[in-house]
Image (tube, rainbow, N blue to C red):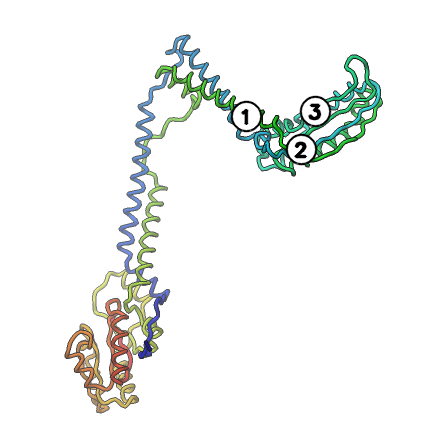
Amino acid sequence: MKENSEFKPQDLWINFRDLFLYVLLRWRSILVVALAGAVLLCGVKYLKDFMDYKNDAGTAVVDESELDVDAKAHVALAVGYRGIYEKHATYNANALYMKIDADAVPTWNLSYLIAGEDSYAVASLYRKHLSSQNLYEGLTGQLEQKNDEYLSAYLAELVSFSLDYESNDAPSEKVFLDIKVVAPTQELCEQVTELMRESMNSLLDEVAAATGTHTSKLVYDHYAVRLTESVRTFQQNSLRAQDNALKDLEEAEGQLTAAEKEYLNQLTDGENTAPAAPPSVRKKYMVLGFLLGGVLMVAWYALRYIFCGRVLSESDVALRYGIHVFGSLASDKKRFFIDRWLLNWLQDKSAQLPLMQRQIALVAKAAESRAVYLIGCGGAADRLPDLAKELQTLDISLQMGDGPLTSDEGVAGMAAADAVLLVKQIGVSTHKDIIRELALAQQLGQTVLGVILLK
């Protein structure tokens, strides 16, 4: 369907000055809700602190002297089982070996040929150096869990060693030192393997000084991804040990009396744990509740402004419909001083009434109008006392009445005129009514002189 009206409204129109004024004029309800938020949040926090304090005060502290020898033994047993369980749980959760996929294990094999006098002792000394946890501390800074105090130990267990020699009874001139590196990822496997190569080279002089002249030569260097049952078996055994430790712990704790359980909790949670503080009014939560309540209401009124659909300012009308706004007339309504200050700061300044009435008369004459119909609202006649006289001096008649959307008299009065002047109340008149009145004036072929706004 073709749109006949040239006055096309915009779906959403945001004037930030109008938005600020719309929200700030509702400062009373914003303040009330902000105060309610402060009281509510502070009250909830106070109630929680009170319950914690009450529970803490109601908890009986068990002194060690109140327990006999058997009770202390029961508690000591539970403490021991808890330590064993936590040790297994920590290892299974953090150890690099437990993160390896047993079906696809990145594996690197190195084999060094150690030749010289008493080569078995030489190879054994190399193995001791390469097994030291201190050797792996240089790699810890490159890993995500670098702050783990056991990380160097987790790295060390990724490397295994074996010696292949002719006989353990007689001295052997040649011994193979086999090094096997496994890791969760190929990247880590490469890093650890490179550390092994560098360490073997750097240890040559130190080991030679301790054992005598010998040679160390890398004779095998191979990488592959393999299914390794030994890794799977180790992981399963470690998880099974954790489950068994948990069962032992639950069984030991299940046999404790109420006093023994309370004493166990004191030992494990810490004897010097500070008791809950007495409840008090927290200023921090009061301020936070005040801010949350205020922000919530500001957001609510900002949303209401977007969809309010009412006339709020001169620019609101002029930019929406492209019609002339003669100005705004001041209201004699008494307001609170804060409201007056906000209106003086953000609202359109009031027009000079005599000048406005003269402008209307001249615009009507320029439009060659002979009869002007003023679509008024409450108090329009009293706010424009000399408009009829101004128009009469130019042989233009003026009739004031209701809008054509509210009464038959308004329709008849508008049809009898050849020009229309709209009077709208800020914050009361709706854009929907303006659109319909402008469309009707266009269909009747009438000139729209402009709009007057009442504050």
In this orientation, does residue 312 appear?
A: yes
Mark 1 crowd level (few <14, some 14–19, many ≥20, 10 Å Cα): few
Q: Is residue 392 above or below residue 177?
A: below
Q: Amino acid at mark 1?
A: Gln
Q: Position of residue 154 (x, y in %)?
A: 61, 28
Residue depicted at 28% across the width and 69% down the height: 311
- Image quarter in which the N terminus is found: bottom left
Front residue of this view, candidates 163 and 95:
163
Mark 3 crowd level (few <14, some 14–19, many ≥20, 10 Å Cα): some
Front residue of this view, candidates 130 and 452:
130
Q: Is residue 268 above or below residue 388?
A: above
Q: Amino acid at mark 3?
A: Phe
| Mark 1 vs 2, N-terminal side | 2
Residue located beneath label 2 in the image: 107
Residue located beneath label 1 in the image: 236
In this orientation, does residue 352 appear?
A: no
- Image quarter in which the C terminus is found: bottom left
Front residue of this view, candidates 31 and 367:
367
Closer to viewer: mark 1 or mark 3: 1
Residue depicted at 67% across the width and 28% down the height: 159
Front residue of this view, candidates 269 and 280:
269
Residue 383 image-quadrant placement: bottom left
Residue 3 image-quadrant placement: bottom left
Residue 401 image-quadrant placement: bottom left
Left or right of residue 450, residue 76 in this image: right
Q: CA distance from mark 2 to mark 3?
A: 13 Å
Disc 2 element = strand
Q: Position of residue 443 (x, y in %)?
A: 26, 82
Residue located beneath label 3 in the image: 161
Q: Position of residue 440 (x, y in %)?
A: 25, 79
Disc 3 element = strand
